[in-house]
Amino acid sequence: MAIFLTEHSRVIVQGMTGAEGGKHTRRMLAAGTNVVGGVTPGKGGQSVDFDGVTVPVFGSVAEAMAGTGADVTVVFVPPRFAKAAVIEAVDAGIGLAVVITEGVPVHDTAVFWAHACAAGNKTRIIGPNCPGIISPGKSNAGIIPADISGPGKIGLVSKSGTLTYQMMYELRDFGFSTAVGIGGDPIIGTTHIDALQAFQDDPETAAIVMIGEIGGDAEERAAAYIAEHITKPVVGYVAGFTAPEGKTMGHAGAIVSGSSGTAAAKQEALEAAGVKVGKTPSEAARLMRECLDPITV
């Protein structure tokens, strides 16, 4: 199986007629994703050809859902329009919104996340500032390269896009049920804990890799959750062991302040919960191989 995104998912792309939206729509289609439409205000009724596949354009998410039965949207709109785009998707009642856009103001994210919560959390939000989600061999919503790894029984949840790609490559011979890039901004929709529980509930996910990074306490909270609720093997990696104090590193949420948010503190919390933690991505991959050896995958 897969979590959040399956071969049955019907995907629309907000911003499909833009440069990035168009480029990645083509890649998603090539990966076998069932892209059924795009959304660009003012361009409803048009269509775009992607290597022989004609995809209709709608003026709104609600129109696209009514016309195609879409249940997933991938958001490729500029940062200043991201809040309105996600709120529109939530108001339309779509099941999953994958927000790829980087540079969304934290206040805007807080607003659209609060809006989704007020609407009863009917729309799962992944991101913003994330690579998206891929269930290899089934569907790909976002910018994760589809040819890194095939299907398998490892679940992956990661704050980092590039480390998602590296871990998928390191463990490509085992394959993945789903890889979720949740993003590294201070406020995100889907968390490590959300993905961990989904993988725990998925009968075809045998083990889980969790990639975190410095800043905040998300990994410590995930560690506490793992200790109480997760019975499948979990291997972790935390980026930023050599990060200097007080300096933002890469993601907007990746900053160490005093003794808070350090990679060492996160490693300690994870190991206390029974999670094996690698000091490098390759070491984490090796630890996962050791976990999988006794498991028939």
Image: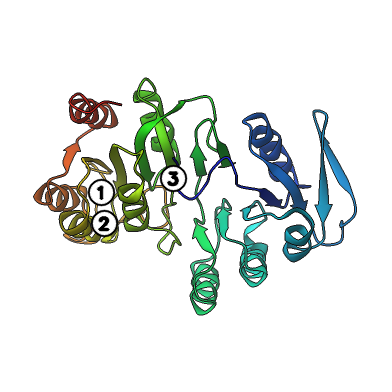
Under mark 3, the amino acid is Val
As drawn, is 8 to the left or to the right of 55?
left
Q: Secondary structure at mark 2?
A: loop
Residue under the point 82% across and 51% down: 57
Contact, CB < 8 Å: mark 1 with mark 2? Answer: yes
Residue under the point 40% across and 33% down: 176
Whole-angstrom CA distance, mark 3 to mark 1, is: 28 Å
Q: Which residue is mark 3?
A: 180
Whole-angstrom CA distance, mark 1 to mark 2, is: 7 Å
Under mark 2, the amino acid is Val
Disc on res. 288: none
Q: Which residue is mark 1?
A: 244
Whole-angstrom CA distance, mark 3 to mark 2, is: 24 Å
Residue 142 in view here:
no
Disc on res. 256: 2
Q: Nearer the viewer, residue 33 or 49?
A: 33
Disc on the earlier residue, 3 or 1: 3
Residue most toward the front?
A: 203
Q: Secondary structure at mark 3?
A: strand
